[in-house]
Image (spheres, rainbow, N blue to C red):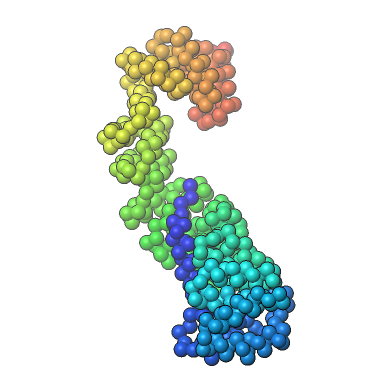
């Protein structure tokens, strides 16, 4: 039911957000002539010397002196030499995780992403609750497209106390892709606390809520999104899904009509619109929607318009169904496979039967179709109805029994059999057949006929 903006678009939106993050990734790209002379930059790049307990590795006085009096001096004049010093330092048995972190930041700054990943991993091995390392490697894995590891590191970062709107937004995206919609909703809400007007995050929140079938909430969120961007077809389409979930099909139809005016309605949405119009007896409007859907050949599987024709027949609008079938044959005539051609012939036979135009000429066609597909109960029922109404009840009864033996057609066959029995004044048998049909698949039309049959039986009995 639910349609989405392409995953790649959502992924690219988040990558753009990632490219504007705070911390060392962006700090490392500040266009200063010599950022290593900037104390604030150096402090953010290397990390605080007053670590938060458990989530930052301690920097010993010896390491602090080494960084200030040796490493930073070399960094200001010879970056390659400083990197070599760090590589050597990180390999010492007693080397702290902070040196791996600094080296990872330098690798990232130089575009050596795989080396950066390894250094961040090394930092975490030395200090498993290293919050900044989990944050940074999470962003880096996201940039590299490794979403599973992104999720693992960001989840750990949040557990350790990370508070970052972009982490929340990326987690929300990842949870949504894993169909963990409650977690996605929670993460989007957390991100929106820090940036309440972010349309992409609001859209993600609305989708997460829609997938939880919280339809009323979804309608309200899409109202807000539509108010800000009424040209965005996806908002109208997904709100229509929410309305359908609420059973408010006419509101969904209004959304589909907006999509129609925007020129962005899909063939599937047109068929859904036609179905809604049939439910409300707007047959001319339904016919127009179905024809427009068929006109989008290539973007619509022929089964959809065939279903539309069947819907019209079931609703009793055989003339409109005939028009839809004519459009199908004109548009798809050269591309119908044997199964689809069979369906067209069956629907045409149903139209003849339902409109009272069936003659003996239809029998060879139905017999041929029954031989072609002996398990199609609808063809058997059509044949049985014809034989019953034309004086061959014995053969009709045999065909009704065959149709009843096919489980998916049992209820429908019993209903038609009950009507045939009623027409032949077999009232008690008719009531039993109708009761069986209603027990299998309760339907209003069957109940109405059953009530009428009981009334006739009582009147005759008295």
| Residue 46 as seen in the image, left or right of residue 379 | right
Residue at 35% of width from left, 31% of height from top?
Answer: 337
Residue 424 image point, x, y percent: 47, 11
Image quadrant in which you'd find residue 272: top left
| Residue 81 as seen in the image, left or right of residue 309 | right
Residue 78 image point, x, y percent: 52, 86
Mark yes or no: residue 276 visible.
Answer: yes
| Residue 345 as seen in the image, left or right of residue 194 | left
Q: Is residue 44 above or below residue 325?
A: below
Q: Residue furthest left?
A: 330
Which residue is more in the foreground, 344 or 374? 374
Q: Is residue 291 above or below residue 169?
A: above
Residue at 41% of width from left, 9% of height from top?
Answer: 391
Which residue is more in the foreground, 143 or 289? 143
Residue at 57% of width from left, 53% of height from top?
Answer: 179
Residue 96 image point, x, y percent: 69, 77
Which residue is more in the foreground, 45 or 402? 45
Image quadrant in which you'd find residue 59: bottom right
Mark yes or no: residue 50 visible.
Answer: no
Q: Quadrant of the C terminus?
A: top right
């Amino acid at each position: 039911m639910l349609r989405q903006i392409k995953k790649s678009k959502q992924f690219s939106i988040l990558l753009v957000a990632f490219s504007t993050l705070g911390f060392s990734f962006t700090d490392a790209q500040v266009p200063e002539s010599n950022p290593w002379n900037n104390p604030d930059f150096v402090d953010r790049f290397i990390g605080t010397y007053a670590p938060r307990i458990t989530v930052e590795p301690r920097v010993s006085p010896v390491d602090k002196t080494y960084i200030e009096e040796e490493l930073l001096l070399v960094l200001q004049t010879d970056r390659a030499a400083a990197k070599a010093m760090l590589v050597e330092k990180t390999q010492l048995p007693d080397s702290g995780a902070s040196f791996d972190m600094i080296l990872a930041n330098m690798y990232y700054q130089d575009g050596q992403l795989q080396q950066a990943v390894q250094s961040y991993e090394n930092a975490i091995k030395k200090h498993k609750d290293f919050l900044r390392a989990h944050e940074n490697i999470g962003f880096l894995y996201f940039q590299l497209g490794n979403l599973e590891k992104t999720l693992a590191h960001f989840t750990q970062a949040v557990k350790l106390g990370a508070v970052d709107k972009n982490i929340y937004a990326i987690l929300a995206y990842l949870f949504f892709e894993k169909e963990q919609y409650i977690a996605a909703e929670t993460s989007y809400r957390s991100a929106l606390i820090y940036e309440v007007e972010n349309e992409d995050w609001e859209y993600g929140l609305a989708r997460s809520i829609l997938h939880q079938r919280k339809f009323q909430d979804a309608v309200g969120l899409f109202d807000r999104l539509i108010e800000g961007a009424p040209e965005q077809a996806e908002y109208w389409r997904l709100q229509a899904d929410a309305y359908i979930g609420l059973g408010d099909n006419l509101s969904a139809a209004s959304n589909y009509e907006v999509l129609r005016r925007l020129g962005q309605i899909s063939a599937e949405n047109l068929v859904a619109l036609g179905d809604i119009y049939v439910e409300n007896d707007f047959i001319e409007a339904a016919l127009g929607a179905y024809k427009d859907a068929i006109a989008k050949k290539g973007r619509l599987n022929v089964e959809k318009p065939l279903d539309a024709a069947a819907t019209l027949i079931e609703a009793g609008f055989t003339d409109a169904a005939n028009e839809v079938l004519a459009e199908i044959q004109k548009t798809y005539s050269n591309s119908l496979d044997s199964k689809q051609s069979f369906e067209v012939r069956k629907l045409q036979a149903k139209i003849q039967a339902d409109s009272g135009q069936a003659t003996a000429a239809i029998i060879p066609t139905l017999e041929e179709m029954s031989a072609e597909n002996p398990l199609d109960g609808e063809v058997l029922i059509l044949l049985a109805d014809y034989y019953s109404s034309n004086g061959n009840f014995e053969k009709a009864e045999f065909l009704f029994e065959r149709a009843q033996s096919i489980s998916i057609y049992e209820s429908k066959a019993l209903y038609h059999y009950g009507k045939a029995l009623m027409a032949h004044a077999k009232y008690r048998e008719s009531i039993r057949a109708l009761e069986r049909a209603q027990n299998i698949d309760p339907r209003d039309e069957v109940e109405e006929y059953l009530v009428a049959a009981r009334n006739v039986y009582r009147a005759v009995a008295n």
